[in-house]
């Protein structure tokens, strides 16, 4: 799997913004990506030193629209901790 295939998109939520103050960044990642692949991808793409990575499988929520029931998509997300003093510039403009 290529580095660009591992990371799908950054997560920009209020909780993710609070984690940025602790040098932690949140990404939606490929469902079959491992922690080592995620660490390498973030390190190579953003030129930062990655200290740790936590992954979470998020299940889709049950929803009802106009009486029909369904589910939102499930996804995998990763919380990546970078070295103190380093930042990922893609998040700074948000």
Image: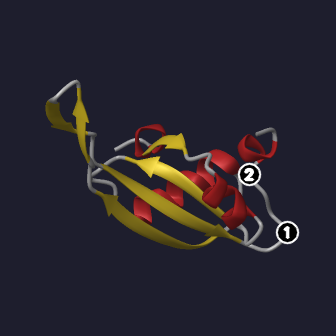
Please state, as top left, top right, bottom left or bottom right, where the N terminus lies in the image: top left
> Image point 16% across, 28% down: which residue?
67
> Image point 26% across, 55% down: which residue?
59
Identify the image quadrant of residue 45. top right
Identify the image quadrant of residue 25. bottom right
> Mark 1 falls on what kind of element?
loop
Identify the image quadrant of residue 65. top left
Q: In the displayed structure, would residue 45 be above or below residue 76?
A: above
Q: Please state the horizontal and vertical placement of residue 89, each as a whole percent of the image.
A: 78, 45
Which of 62 and 75 lies nearest the eye of the viewer?
62
> Mark 2 falls on what kind of element?
loop
**58 horizontally vs 90: left or right:** left
Please state, as top left, top right, bottom left or bottom right, where the C terminus lies in the image: top right
Residue placed furthest toward the front: 67
> Image point 81% across, 38% down: which residue?
93
Residue placed furthest toward the right: 85
Which of 41 and 21 lies nearest the eye of the viewer?
21
**9 horizontally vs 75: left or right:** right
Q: How many angstroms separate mark 1 from mark 2 (CA)?
A: 10 Å
**60 horizontally vs 39: left or right:** left
Which of 94 and 15 lies nearest the eye of the viewer?
15
> Image point 67% across, 66% down: which residue?
19
Q: Please state the horizontal and vertical placement of residue 88, each as a whole percent of the image.
A: 74, 51
Which residue in the structure is indicated by mark 1? 85
Which residue in the structure is indicated by mark 2? 88
């Amino acid at each position: 799997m290529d580095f660009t295939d591992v990371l799908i998109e950054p997560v920009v939520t209020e909780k993710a913004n609070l984690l940025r103050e602790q040098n932690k960044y949140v990404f939606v990642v490929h469902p079959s990506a491992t922690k080592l692949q995620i660490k390498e991808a973030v390190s190579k793409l953003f030129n930062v030193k990655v200290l740790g990575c936590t992954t979470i499988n998020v299940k889709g929520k049950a929803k009802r629209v106009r009486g029909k029931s369904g589910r939102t998509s499930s996804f995998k997300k990763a919380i990546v901790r970078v070295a103190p003093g380093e930042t990922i510039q893609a998040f700074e403009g948000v």
